[in-house]
Amino acid sequence: MTVALAGSAYRTRHRACPACGADNAARPPGPYARDPWQVKACGGCGFVYLENVPVYEELADEHAWEKSAPAEGAARRRESPVLQGFSKTTRFRLHWFKRTRLADLARRHVPPGMVVDVGCGDGWQIANLPGDYVRCGIEISKDMAERARRALEPRGGFVACAPAVAGLNQLPEGRVSGVVMRSFLEHESDPAGALAGTARALAVGGALIVKVPNYGSLNRLVMGRKWCGFRWPDHVNYFTPRSLVAMVRAAGLEVAQFGLLDHLPTSDNMWLVARKG
């Protein structure tokens, strides 16, 4: 199927619930759907997800994130110029505590060795990670992967230009010290597969660090369809604290850190650290 949005044509495919596998084709879209994007709550497990996702291969080029993100931002500014301007200038959010930092979590949980950033973009995030790590990345966008190579290869790392699951399955089994999924898992059409690939690649004692939007946040209830966590069709999974923990555990990983301050109901985002036992 092909849908048109903002002058671009997306080839899409139907997707069953990525959490439990139930097919919800007969269920009506939920209140946060936006034509033509079918956001649904699974009738079996309640997981909220985008049912008609863009064909994965197209994300490598014409619909890569670095191209779709500016378009989405422009659309938000056109729809709500006052709200978006206020948010940009004040960084207003309904939370009161300092956000968790990737560097702090890595320092506490990730042992020295190979660290892989899934959806690494241009590589800046993993390149600047402190510690005794071999910094590597997986990135589907061809342009961004080339930028990441220039940042990481001189430091002894590598970048795989591939979909996340394929890239993770290329890694040596049981040899990776850490995997970073910062602002990634909400984009991944096969999140369970990506987590299973992570569990396969991690060494015993290795850690996964995840940051995703918090669909259970009070801000989502207040903002409704204008919540910053809604991005059509880039965001295809909408995690609550409970559903994120369930999917991580289903992959065979143990939750190492996920306290209240990591998923405040007043925050738009949440951080989780899991470990391979």
Image (tube, rainbow, N blue to C red):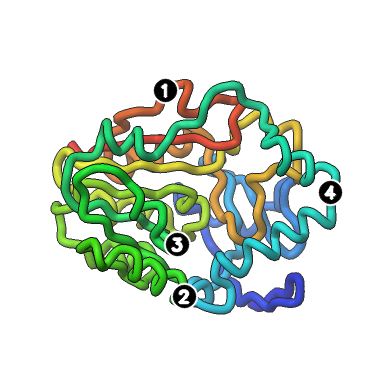
Query: Which picture quadrant has residue 163?
Result: bottom left
**Residue at 45% from the left image edge and 69% from the top image edge:** 144
Residue 132 lies, in percent from the top left, at 19, 45
Q: Distance between the residues labelled 4 and 1?
A: 34 Å
Tag nearer the camera, 4 or 1: 4
Q: How far apart are marks 2 and 4 (CA)?
A: 31 Å
Residue at numbered disc 3: 121
Q: Are marks 4 and 1 in contact (CB under 8 Å)?
A: no
Q: Nearer the viewer, residue 130 or 11?
A: 130
Residue at numbered disc 2: 143
Q: Is mark 2 on a helix, strand or loop?
A: helix
Numbered circle sitting on residue 259: 1
Residue 188 lies, in percent from the top left, at 47, 58
Can residue 220 be seen here? The reply is no
Q: Do the residues labelled 1 and 3 touch (CB within 8 Å)?
A: no
**Residue at 58% from the left image edge and 65% from the top image edge:** 53
N-terminal-most mark, 1 or 3: 3
Under mark 2, the amino acid is Asp
Tag nearer the camera, 2 or 4: 2
Q: Is mark 3 on a helix, strand or loop?
A: loop
Numbered circle sitting on residue 80: 4
N-terminal-most mark, 4 or 1: 4
Q: Which quarter of the figure is the C terminus placed in?
A: top left
Left/right of residue 63 with respect to residue 78 in the rendered view = left
In the displayed structure, would residue 80 be above or below residue 234?
Answer: above
Under mark 1, the amino acid is Gly
